[in-house]
Amino acid sequence: MRRKVVAGNWKMHKNYSEAVSLVSDLKNELINENLKCDVIVCPPFTFLEAAHTVVKSSEIQLGAQNMHFEEKGAFTGEVSAEMLKSVGCEYVILGHSERRKIFEESDETINKKVRAALAAGLRPIFCIGETLEEREGGKMFDVLGTQLKEGLKEVDAEGMGKIIVAYEPVWAIGTGKTATPDQAEEAHQFVRKTLGEIFDDGVAEKTVIQYGGSVKPNNAAELLAKENIDGALVGGACLEAESFLEIVRAAP
Ligand code: PEP
């Protein structure tokens, strides 16, 4: 039985005091709650240490939104996996469609990051997803298959056991358009089948596959009720404690 995992991707939002206040509100609200899912918050780099100070005595886990694949060196402006570990991160979002599109990250770059994160003991939240054009052109399964195969190259079964896959159709991110629960379930079934081909059915069955793309309090429950939807990666709705908590509490 897979435990659901709800993660909040804050993207480039909040200042220091807003960040501390949001994470403190989440902690205080969830402190005596018997959580039905794991909860991860992914603030910007600059607030990770402060967020860690708040959440370390709670069940909330910490993730970053990106990292570089090299261990160290002359990479101005970049942050390594080890640096993220040293400020209390357990997770890192990799391959987000905004990184793929705006920052032109290729499957090869994302694969290097996935492997570097695992080597440093960080758990990747590995994002994949098709554009609207790709979906309408009948290429969705090809695109998802390629992103999975290329992004997970040279990852072994043990490494895969540490990875969360986030299926995020690009057309649903930040647009208010959500995949219907059936559309999402269809993609998740395909992801699980493909993981079975790359690894084996045991690995595929254990892998947590989150859905991301305009998850809101009013649609979370029906998405999370689907058999192969093991959680949510939430953007916009994670920026307010109330809406993020409603999604967390929608986990069956
Ligand atoms: C995301 O950026 O991962 C995301 C799913 O954003 P939103 O929930 O705002 O669509």
Image (cartoon, rainbow, N blue to C red):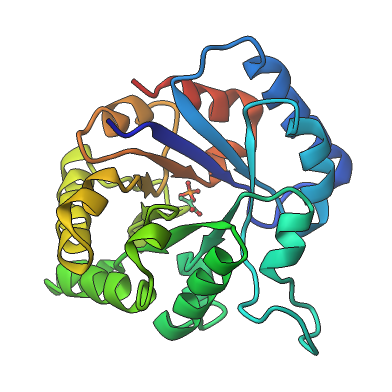
Instruction: State whether residue 84 is above or below residue 136.
Output: above
Residue nearer the viewer, 242 or 150: 150
Vertical placement of 139 versus 38: above or below? below
Query: For this rendering, which residue is in front, 198 or 102?
Result: 198
Let me know if residue 151 appears in the view.
Answer: yes
Q: How many marks?
A: 0
**Residue at the image point whose x is 20% and y is 34% from the top:** 227
Query: Quadrant of the image for the N terminus?
Result: top left
Using the image, determine if residue 198 lies above or below residue 21.
Answer: below
Q: Residue 228 placed where, x, y %?
A: 22, 40
Q: Residue furthest right?
A: 17
Question: Visible in this render: residue 133?
Answer: no
Which residue appears at 26% of the width and 53% of the height?
203
Q: Which residue is most to the bottom?
A: 74
Name which quarter of the figure residue 122 lies in. bottom right
Q: Is residue 53 left or right of residue 10?
A: right
Q: Is residue 206 above or below residue 55?
A: below
Identity of the residue furthest to the top in this view: 32
Residue shown at 33% from the left, 58% from the top: 169
Residue 103 horizontal side relative to residue 126, left or right: right
Does residue 153 appear left or right of residue 140 in this picture?
Answer: right
Residue 83 place in picture, x, y as percent: 76, 64
Question: What x and y, as percent, mark residue 187?
Answer: 20, 54
Quadrant hosting residue 236: top right
- Given the current orientation, which residue lies at the most extreme left position? 138
**In what quadrant of the picture does the C terminus appear?**
top left
The residue under the point 63% across, 32% down is: 60
Task: Return the x and y of residue 101 as percentages of the image width and height.
Answer: 48, 76
